Image (cartoon, grey):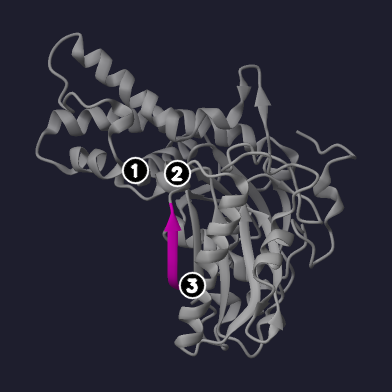
Amino acid sequence: MAKSSSDPRDEVNAPLAHGALNLPLVTIDDYNNELRDKDGFVGDNANKKTFQLKLDDWRKRIRKVGDDPLGKAATEKLSKKKIDAFLKGEDMEAAALVMGAVEDFAQDFADVIGKFLKDKRWTKTERIVVGGGFRQSRFGELAIARTMVILKVAGVDVEVVPIAHHPDEAGLIGAVHLMPRWMFKGHEVILAVDIGGTNVRAGVVKFGKDDVPNFADASVWESAIWRHADDEPSRTATIEKLAAMLRDLIGKAEKANLKPAPIIGIACPGIIKADGSIERGGQNLPGGNWESDSFNLPAALMKAIPEIGDDSTFVMMHNDAVVQGLSQIPFMNDVSRWAVLTIGTGLGNAHFTNREGTKAR
């Protein structure tokens, strides 16, 4: 899918713009790729719902000939922890049933990856890291590994590996790569936010030691999560709640003498324009209408939190898959071109090329 001349992603080449394509350590070749085939969006074949459908199909088939080893609970009610328990448990039939779904999902996921790799912006991809909530499970890890085996056998030379950090933390840690390192001088932590269709996470991210390159030891010092899907808040109420979460985290960081930088990094679904507005892709965010011309999330947060410490607040926002991918920069020194796919409610995606000198920074 080639970019059109009006694609808002073409407008953000400045290094300190929201949704910037040129970041300190990588160039973003592509993100939020809405790749289609004759059946619709390619990403719809590799998400949380897809795996549930595969598992449910196996359960329906086995019920025709006997008892369902996974019990009576509806498939969509089975948590990742419960599915993992079936996979690791002593009931081999239950484990085998889950493995059937893993195999079917991996076949589809390999097909999806193959289609992305045919996009010219994804050529010469050496490694794909897989994040999102699906990765944080044993069955998810097996599906990722099986996908790589399928691709290898098919002659596709690309690594497919789980994201290194916990996906919940990767979406926060990646924020440190949105700005040049000099902006953090004299500070020890940054505030980060990861907004999704179900949860909002906010956290305090420690930069790590100054002599460690590329923030390789960055970590989440403290975080908070709000499952907004249970409350169905308005957009305004969401901003108010998020601001309260951030104020609480700022207070904790200051009390611990961590010297927070006056910066908030935001990971948010959709295509992010240079002014911080959302072009499209924010339809699942709480309260709706996040793509309105009259709404700007960075501006709303700066208004709610005008200062951090003695300095004016600065906010930088990018796509959530991009930010999750950025957390992997320290582990990508041995490749040049790589990508991230995040499996959750949808399939987030981004592709990167390491910039000259990344290894030394």
As drawn, 254 above or below 29: below
Mark 1 residue type: Leu
Q: Would you say residue 222 sits in the magenta stretch? A: yes
Q: Earlier in the sequence, mark 2 or mark 3?
A: 2
Residue at the far left in the pictured view: 90
Q: Earlier in the sequence, mark 3 or mark 1?
A: 1
The disc placed on residue 248 is 3
* Residue span colored magenta: 219-226
Mark 3 residue type: Asp
Q: Secondary structure at mark 3?
A: helix
As drawn, 225 above or below 62: below
Q: Secondary structure at mark 2?
A: loop
Residue at the far right in the pictured view: 5
Q: Is residue 306 visible?
A: yes
Q: Give the CA separation, mark 1 to mark 2.
A: 34 Å
Instruction: Report the residue at 19% width, 34% height from top.
Output: 95
